[in-house]
Each structure stands twice: as C-alpha cells, then as structure tokens.
Amino acid sequence: QVQLGESGGGLVQPGGSPRPSCAASGSIFSIDHIGWYRRAPGNQREFVASITSDGSTNYAEYVKGRFTISRDNAKNTVNLQMTSLKPEDTAVYYCYAWKANWGSLHSWGQGTQVTVSS
C-alpha cells in the first residue's frame, strides 16, 4: 500500500488560505481516488474532496467554491487549496488513497491540524 503524509496545516485566521499537501511514498497516477477527509472536534470524519486518476474532482457541499483539490503526479502529491476559511473548518485533515483492486480498503495519512481562529 502507498504511504501518505500530510503537511501544511496550522493556525490560520478566518478568511485565510492554507494549502495542505499530501505526499505519497510512490507514484499516484495509478491511484484511482485520492483526496481528503476531515474530523472536527466532536464530529464524525467527513468527506472533503477527492480527485481521480483522470482528474475528475468531487467536493463536499460545504466546501464547494472555497476549496480546490489538485494532484501533481510528477511530485506524487495531492494538494488542497483552501480559501475563505471559517471557524467551522477547524479539523484534522486526513489524506486518503484508494484503488479499485483494493476493494473497500483505503490508505490513510496521519492527518494535519487546521485551526481557524482569530
């Protein structure tokens, strides 16, 4: 399985624009889905965004128009450009990867904390 490592989180002000990144241990162009979930305090882990091997993207309704996911196959990295952050965006953001031949299994990163506070 691919190993994933997130970076780029931290403390940001409301309206800020961090850009967390997820680096994979190997090539990601063979990964069917790669993207992000998040877990806010007291909440279940929830889907944020994903991108497929052909570049198709999917977003949770609460981030549409604010977040943009992209993948850089040359760098084996997926990025999440976040804009117009709100306090409710505060969460640990987890990178995941999935391939069709893995069945229901996913690879997960350890997460990066994004805290939105003035």
Image (cartoon, grey):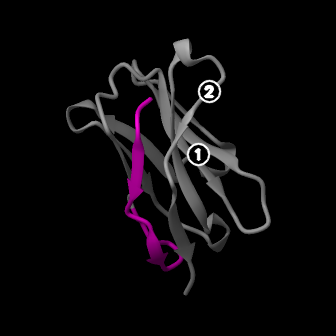
Which residue is situated farthest in the front direction here? 1
Q: Position of residue 79 (x, y in %)?
A: 38, 47
The kind of residue on which mark 1 rests is Lys
| Front-lying residue, 83 or 107 | 107
58 left or right of 27 in image:
right
Whether label 2 touches label 1, CB < 8 Å: no
Residue corresponding to mark 2: 105
**Residue placed at 20% from the left, 32% from the top?**
74
Residue corresponding to mark 1: 64
Q: Is residue 78 visible?
A: yes
Quote the CA–CA distance across marks 2 and 1: 26 Å
Please say whether residue 5 is one of the residues in the magenta stretch: yes
Residue stretch in magenta: 1-18
Tell me which corner region of the image, top left, top right, bottom left or bottom right, holds residue 8. bottom left
Please say whether residue 117 is one of the residues in the magenta stretch: no
**Residue placed at 45% from the left, 45% from the top?**
68
Q: Earlier in the sequence, mark 2 or mark 1?
A: 1
| Front-lying residue, 5 or 19 | 5
Packing grade of label 1 (10 A; few <14, some 14-19, many >=20) is few
Magenta stretch: dominant secondary structure: loop
Packing grade of label 2 (10 A; few <14, some 14-19, many >=20) is few
Question: Relative to 52, does residue 59 appear above or below in the rendering?
Answer: below
Q: Position of residue 34 (x, y in %)?
A: 47, 33
Which residue is situated farthest in the left direction here? 74
**Residue placed at 47% from the left, 77% from the top?**
12
Question: Relative to 91, does residue 6 appear above or below in the rendering?
Answer: above
